[in-house]
Image (tube, grey):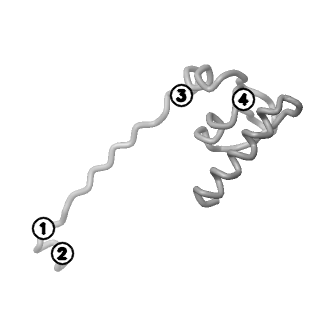
Amino acid sequence: MDPEARRQLWALVSKIARTKTSAVVLTTHSMEEAEVLSTKMGIMAKGGNFKCLGSSHHIKTKFGSGYIVEIKIRTPKSEEEDI
């Protein structure tokens, strides 16, 4: 989904959620999307069992160790380019 369409969908879902007469259940792999649209979120594992349920802060604190990737690129010298 392109960024403009995504923002329009987010606005629509937010409007529905604000009415307080309905609940919105959203499944996503995007933490950004979940934070924008949710007051509470959960992590599901193994086909639907909740591993964690709470605010985005709670989930980030418990599972947000993340990854650090370091990439080093060596620029070839001119004589190596001819090989």
Looking at the image, is mark 1 or mark 3 earlier in the sequence? 3
Q: Which residue is mark 3?
A: 64
| Secondary structure of residue under mark 2 | helix
Identify which amino acid the numbered label 3 is placed on: Gly
Front one among 10 and 73: 10
The residues tagged by marks 4 and 1 sit, at their Cα atoms, a distance apart of 51 Å
Separation of residues labelled 1 and 3 (CA atoms): 41 Å
The amino acid on which the numbered mark 4 sits, given as a three-letter code, is: Gly
Q: How many marks are shown on the rendered structure?
A: 4
Residue 52 lies, in percent from the top left, at 71, 24
Q: Is residue 58 above or below residue 4?
A: above
| Residue to which mark 4 is pinned | 42
**Badge 1 element:** loop
Q: Secondary structure at mark 4?
A: strand
Figure quadrant of residue 56: top right
Asked if the residue at tag 2 contacts the one at tag 1, i.e. Cβ–Cβ closer than 8 Å, the answer is yes
Of pointers 3 and 4, the one earlier in the residue sequence: 4
- In what element is the residue under mark 3? loop
Within-10-Å neighbours for mark 3: few <14, some 14–19, many 20+: few
- Label 2 Cα crowd, 10 Å radius (few <14 / some 14-19 / many 20+): few
Q: Earlier in the sequence, mark 4 or mark 2?
A: 4
- Residues at marks 3 and 4, CA–CA distance in whole angstroms: 13 Å
Type of amino acid at the residue the image marks with label 1: Lys
Residue appearing at x 18%, y 66% in the figure: 76
> Residue 44, which numbered label?
none
Q: CA distance from mark 2 to mark 3?
A: 42 Å
Q: Which residue is mark 1?
A: 77
